[in-house]
Amino acid sequence: MNRRNSVFVLSCLAFGYAFLYIPIMSMVVFSFNASKLVTVWDTANSPTLKWFYALLCDDEILGAAWISLKIALINATGSVILGVLAGYGLARFPKFRGRASLNAMTTAPLVMPEVITGLSLLLLFVALEQETGWPAGRGVGTMIMSHMTFSMAYVTVVLRSRLATFDLSLEEAAMDLGARPVKVFFLITLPIILPAILSGWLLAFTLSWDYLVISSFTSGPGSSTLPMVIYSKVRLGVSPEVNALATLTIGAVTIIVVGVSLWMARANRLAQAP
Amino acid sequence: MTSVAAEMAKAAPWNDPHARPYVELVRVSKFFGDFKAVDDVSLKIYRGEIFCLLGASGCGKTTLLRMLGGFESPSSGRIYIDGEDMSGVPPYERPVNMMFQSYALFPHMTVEQNVAFGLKQDRVPKAAIRERVAAMLDLVKLGEYAKRKPSQLSGGQRQRVALARSLVKRPKLLLLDEPLGALDKKLREHTQFELIGLQHQLGVTFLVVTHDQEEAMTLASRIAVMDHGEIAQAGTPTEIYEFPSSRFVADFVGSVNIFEGKLVEDEPEYVRIASEEFGGTIYVSHGISAAPEATVWAAVRPEKILMSTTPPQGADNVARGAVQDIAYLGDLSIYLVKLATGKVVRITRPNTTRHAEAIGWDQEVYLSWDPSSPVVVTR
Amino acid sequence: MKRLRARFSGRGLVVALPYLWLLLFFVAPFVIVLKISFSEVDLAIPPYKPLFSWYAEHALAIRLNFNNYAFLFTDKLYADAFLNSVKVALVSTILCLLIGYPMAYGMARARPRTRNVLLLLVVLPFWTSQLLRVYAWIGLLKANGVVNNVLIRLGVIHNPLALLYTPFAMYVGIVYSYLPFVILPLYANIEKMDWQLIEAAEDLGCRPWQAFYKITLPLSRNGILAGSMLVFIPAVCEFVIPTLLGGPNSLMIGRILWDEFFSNRAWPVASAVAILMLLLLVPFMMWYQSIQARETAGPSG
């Protein structure tokens, strides 16, 4: 089981991790560079926090970040509700009408390219508005609906695989001890799958925070999200403010992912079924 | 042994036609598609019994248990518990609790919370819950583990938590699915006696499902041997072992030598069977009910066969053979003796002295048994 | 019996909400795209003509316009873009596998503690914004970027290389972005493998590389296929990376769709492009789905 890796495999690992981390590290390093040229290190005035300060004063970025945050929060919560329902249904009900189509509809978004989905959702919203008057115009609302459709698929996958390894006799035991099915769900099933629900929520949040193409198609005037603003900035080349933003993002992701991993490892250790 | 089961064996309510059964199954069947998991089973279980369902995996014993628990509904037939028809009663309304094979301890709750769970569902007052849980945990000797999570317990401790959790509600009937299956051999033996003691103290009726015949023999007041969804035989451990009703039961419970033969003399006090396999006649000192000239089988347990180097007296129940193999197990030895007819007979002899006896490999020996030893079965 | 069934009557409610949601926001849009791909461009809002129109009282006229598709097949630009996209996606997938497989293998064979750290290090970039990670390569690859500076400092080159806005930069960007998508399914697959199989093979006379080739590789087939699909399908339609790193000449079908839609406001043409892309990708998506079904069903040979 624990046999040593060969030199070849070890060098592949070293190369792979270098490949993954050199670009990220370079962004972090250059976010403290005083020069506006970004990649030319200004030894005299660096390191500096001035780009972080500039970032905090940039109303366009702050406004976009606020919109992105709102969308991501609502999206994550909505996706978890839809994803838990779909994942529970698919994992627990062996037979119901439409099972095959629900299965297909929840796995297809995982591999559906963003340009196609973005385009089709926009056309849906335009057609709906023409026929019914709803949704009136496009903006935060339409973006949330679009994001939810795709991130719920990820939540479904996470929940489904968690429920697949769920020991059904736990629920039977609770029922045997006098709990009605609804109570069984809230007292037994839900607490046990809570770590999976939380990781589903975080996944949905992150996906929504990152969606660029889908947002570009389904947003409206005055509702640019953070990725859309970053995209328009970096199309013109490197920007020190974006480096500062990247450093903040990486810092936040590292703290959250490492923290959640540690917490989940602990929860899993405790939850190890006999 | 002063268990309820032992007292039950003396009282033997199952022999009393007026005794009221506590749990009754009336012609219960269960189909999964075309598969007959349980086939027309009728059973009566009396108050205070430890009743064992014994069978190989897939014989329908777990399905039967799950129907009593309310997790499966019978395809036909009725189940009564304490006189009440259980049809359509969901698991959470049945006066029955179950101890699951995997124990099914809630991983996110402490030992104490696990045991209290069932009482909370019944809205028992908080103080009473605390009291009953503490008493139960003391009873299974887990008082000091109350605040632990199941993952921090050993296998034997988990088993006791599961037992405590299912007993604390004082069910009318406790269902135990392979209760000792996950424990190692030494712990299993010890726990068997603990289980009997606990049952004696609480007076709860137990229904145990097991595939381990030794476990069934130790625990049970009565055993039902199941095969392909049907009950092959139900009776006390002694009845099952000494008076099996078929070749299947004789072979499934313990080991046995079976000789096929024809009934040549059929009298009320004795029968005589001519068996080609045995290479002689078998004299049995009790009468049986079978058609004359019918094919019957005489079953003889290995420990009831005598082995000697000198010819025993009489012509019946005697055969000659050569020792083919000897297995030394410490407390006893198993001899495989090949008869002149080619049939191999299994004999066990206790090792009463420390020096191995004179019988060795390839030695010619005579086999014989008491005329009361064989059981004659017709199927 | 009746009560037992009543317990499950809530089933319909559980699945109805996600089902209807997906029907409205996932299936219906494709029907509309299909419809619009058959309509004519119009200078109006929205910029296409209706497919159905009512004449007089009860006459329904349906005008199916195949011009959009005809246009895509006559203008060589589109065919080239399609082929180029498939080529780019294919090459990227192979590169991802070549880098990702040894990594996943090394991770799976590391000690459990190390394994968790290595896994976390692969997952971290996956959670970090893809856009920002692509952006990082602009800083690395541009004329006065990190790579050129280092090479000049080392004396390997004297004048900066043109790295950014080339196919090379685009491949680097795609491989970099999608590498975690290959490593994760492969790792999940290899990690499940019973290493005693390798020991058995070696015991029966296989050299280590033979054991790898004859045992490990065939057993990780599903992981390889799943990882490949997760790179290939989105890479075919990739829009951001070719635009940011590939320069103005990178001919990718995702960019064409974007430009037709936003720059030319040719919604019907963009819809037709989307439908053709879908026709190309649906077999791969179904393949992926069947692999996933097999993987969740249990280990297979």
Image: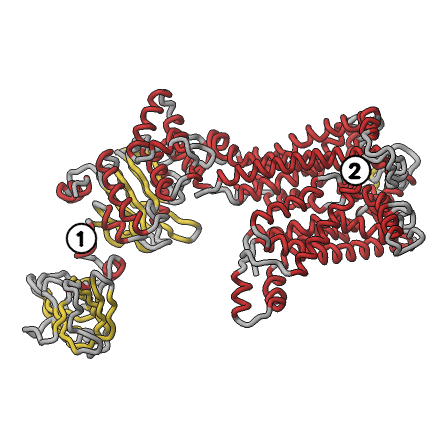
How dense is the environment of label 1, judged by Cα within 10 Å: few (below 14), some, or many (20 and up)? some
Q: Which mark is residue A212?
A: 2
Q: Does residue C66 appear in the picture of this structure?
A: no
Specify the amino acid type for callout 1.
Answer: Glu
Task: Tell me where residue B158 sits by quadrant.
Answer: top left
Q: Which residue is mark 1?
A: B239
Image position of B6 with respect to C204: above or below: above
Q: Does residue A181 appear in the picture of this structure?
A: yes
Quarter containing the N terminus of chain B: top left
> B55 or B169: which is nearer to us?
B169
Secondary structure beneath label 2: loop
Q: Position of residue C69 (x, y in %)?
A: 86, 50
Dot 2: chain letter = A
Secondary structure beneath label 1: helix
Image position of C8 with respect to C191: above or below: above
> C29 or B132: which is nearer to us?
B132
